Image: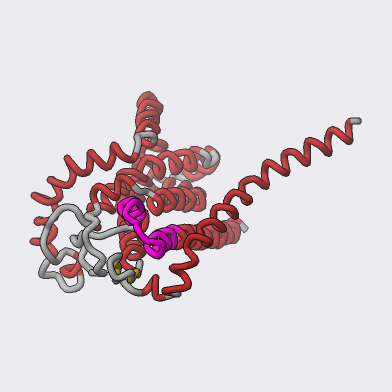
Amino acid sequence: MTRRTDRIFAGGVAGLALLVPATLLLITTLLLIDAFPAIRAYGLSFLTTTTWDPVKLVFGAGAYVFGTLVTTALAVAFAAPVAIGAAIFLTEYAPRATRAPLAFLIEVLAYIPSIVYGLWGFFVVVPLMRSAIEPALQAGLGSVPLLGALVSGPIVGLDLLMGGVILAIMILPILLTVTREVLLAVPPTQREGMLGLGATRWETVTRVVLPYARVGIVGAIILGVARAFGETMAVTLVVGNSSTAISPSLFTPGYTMASAIANQFTEADSDLYFSAIVEIAVVLLLVAIVVNAAARLLIRRTGAAREGLLL
């Protein structure tokens, strides 16, 4: 009786575990079925061309992929250093009485709905970017080779740079919270041993704590990338949604794949138009899979390097 109960329980939990990959497989299959007309019509040119003309039924999502990659890269570049530095402060330097309240406030920020971030960005940050920050960047970097191309063009405030900024603010709580937990997981003996050898607090952090927690910090960045890739409403409100041109300038109003779906899904008045929108969702899913696979490979290599150092 006991063995039979164990087998039933094992089968039940195995079935529940299989629901996750089965759901992903079902979603992918349905998306591929709906996207097949566009896949058949455009092939790989769907990813390499930027012409998006619903009137002539010509669709190319290259600009949407580009906008997604640019805003995500900007978000990680802005948020990761701040998150790591703040996590180090909370775990190593902040007075113990303030650590828990600050950590609680950070966790609250993570639960704010994305539409709230989007509205705040549209009404508060966009005017600031348009009137002060972007003109200052253009004045300071406009004449610098290569960097000048990043800040060229008219300033409107609703652009790829603003999309990256709002995404950075959104993923910052997640990065900071996870990084803080990773740093807290470093064994106290690691710190005590380094301090006992006469190292300063800064040397302990840079030579022991951060190398030990490196894999976990990479995992935190992956979580941030995952949220930035799929974020929709906040980016839709601030990224511009008015150009499908691929330009080196961060001041270009653009689209991300998620914002393109949100803006145009209800406007898809033909089967091919609808199929092209769904194909964007397929590309978004595939890009997310590739990014996560690359991140796992990075984690594996980082873990192997850390094991080699310990040996």
Residue beneath the point at 37% across and 24% down: 97
x and y percentages locating residue 66 in the rendered image = 33, 65
Q: Which residue lies furthest to the right in this view?
A: 1
Q: Inspect the magenta stretch and tell me whether residue 268 lies in it.
A: yes
Q: Looking at the image, which is closer to me, 237 or 138? A: 237
Residue beneath the point at 17% across and 47% down: 126
Q: Identify whether 50 is placed above or below 303.
A: below
Task: Say whether residue 71 is visible.
Answer: yes
Residue beneath the point at 35% across and 36% down: 113
Q: Looking at the image, which is closer to me, 35 or 128? A: 35
x and y percentages locating residue 186 in the rendered image = 52, 42
Report the side of 115 relative to 25 (left or right). Answer: left
Q: Give the range drawn in magenta.
A: 259-281
The dominant secondary structure in magenta is helix
Q: Identify whether 175 is placed above or below 6.
A: below
x and y percentages locating residue 277 in the rendered image = 39, 59
Report the side of 264 relative to 25 (left or right). Answer: left
Q: In which quarter of the image is residue 89?
A: top left
Q: Identify whether 246 is placed above or below 165.
A: below
x and y percentages locating residue 101 in the rendered image = 37, 26
Task: Say whether residue 77 is visible.
Answer: no
Report the side of 253 relative to 207 (left or right). Answer: left
Report the side of 50 relative to 311 (left or right). Answer: left
